[in-house]
């Protein structure tokens, strides 16, 4: 969308953690309002109609119908905590929320560079996004090889997620049935 720019490219207008997204990590998307990217975003267009709010929770109409069922399905990034993350960012303040997310990004980048045989990128992005920072920071492993460590990290993340009732996979929207 032309002229849609934001100062915070880490946390989107609608509550997604852009820096924890595989598309952002691969350089395919600059983050919400960072230039070329998802320029057809209806929420970005809505922001223009509401005094260019920086976050939807600044809008007097939030939460609106656009958020009905928003956490049910994912895109390239998980939407599972989208509304909860908006509340958390609002309560903590954007600077504190971004600081926490930057710590998660650092962990994610380490996981991807040191413990990824090429098949864990989405899993790590989802896990680091959904699991509490303290849990992600405190995962320790004993494996000797990088592959053993990768397997152990995945298993530990799955265990933490199971204890918290979190699903560590992207949930695609079902395909529409043809008539």
Image (cartoon, rainbow, N blue to C red):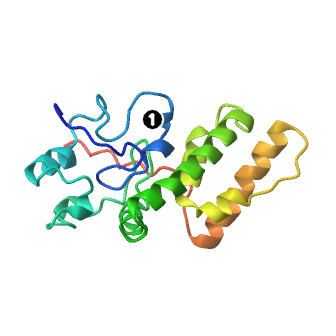
Q: Which residue is mark 1?
A: 24
Which of the 4 image quadrants contains residue 79?
Answer: bottom left
Q: Residue at x 69, y 33 (%)?
A: 113
Q: Split into 4 quadrants, where in the image is the N terminus?
A: top left
Q: From this viewpoint, is residue 83 visible?
A: yes
Q: Residue at x 48, y 49 (%)?
A: 170
Judging depth in this view, the residue of 20 and 122 nearest the camera is 20
Q: Mark 1 Cα within 10 Å, few/some/many (few <14, many 20+)?
A: many
Judging depth in this view, the residue of 139 and 164 nearest the camera is 139
Compared across the picture, whether 71 is left or right of 149 comes to left
Which of the 4 image quadrants contains residue 31?
Answer: top left
Exactly how many numbered labels are in the figure?
A: 1
Coordinates of residue 153 in the picture (x, y in percent): 74, 51
Coordinates of residue 142 in the picture (x, y in percent): 88, 52
Which of the 4 image quadrants contains residue 117?
Answer: top right
Q: Is residue 39 above or below residue 97?
A: above
Q: Residue at x 39, y 52 (%)?
A: 16
Q: Is residue 65 above or below residue 13?
A: below
Q: Residue furthest left?
A: 49
Q: Split into 4 quadrants, where in the image is the C terminus?
A: top left
Coordinates of residue 5 in the picture (x, y in percent): 24, 38
Q: Is residue 146 above or below residue 17?
A: above
Coordinates of residue 8 in the picture (x, y in percent): 36, 46
Q: Could you say whether the residue bearing mark 1 is in a helix, strand or loop? A: helix
Q: Residue furthest front?
A: 95
Q: Residue at x 84, y 43 (%)?
A: 148
Q: From this viewpoint, is residue 67 visible?
A: no
Compared across the picture, whether 92 is left or right of 32 comes to right
């Amino acid at each position: 969308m032309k002229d849609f720019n934001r100062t915070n490219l880490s946390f989107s207008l609608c509550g997604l953690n852009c820096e924890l997204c595989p598309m952002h990590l691969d350089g395919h998307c600059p983050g919400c309002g960072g230039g070329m990217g998802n320029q057809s975003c209806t929420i970005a267009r809505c922001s223009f109609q509401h005094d260019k709010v920086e976050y939807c929770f600044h809008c007097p109409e939030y939460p609106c119908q656009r958020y009905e069922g928003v956490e049910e399905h994912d895109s390239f990034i998980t939407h599972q905590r989208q509304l909860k993350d908006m509340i958390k960012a609002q309560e903590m303040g954007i600077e504190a929320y971004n600081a926490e997310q930057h710590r998660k990004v650092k962990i994610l980048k380490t996981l991807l560079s040191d413990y990824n045989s090429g098949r864990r990128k989405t899993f790590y992005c989802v896990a680091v996004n959904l699991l509490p920072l303290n849990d992600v920071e405190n995962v320790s492993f004993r494996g000797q090889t990088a592959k053993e460590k990768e397997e152990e990290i995945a298993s530990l993340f799955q265990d933490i997620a199971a204890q918290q009732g979190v699903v560590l996979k992207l949930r695609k929207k079902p395909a529409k049935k043809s008539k």
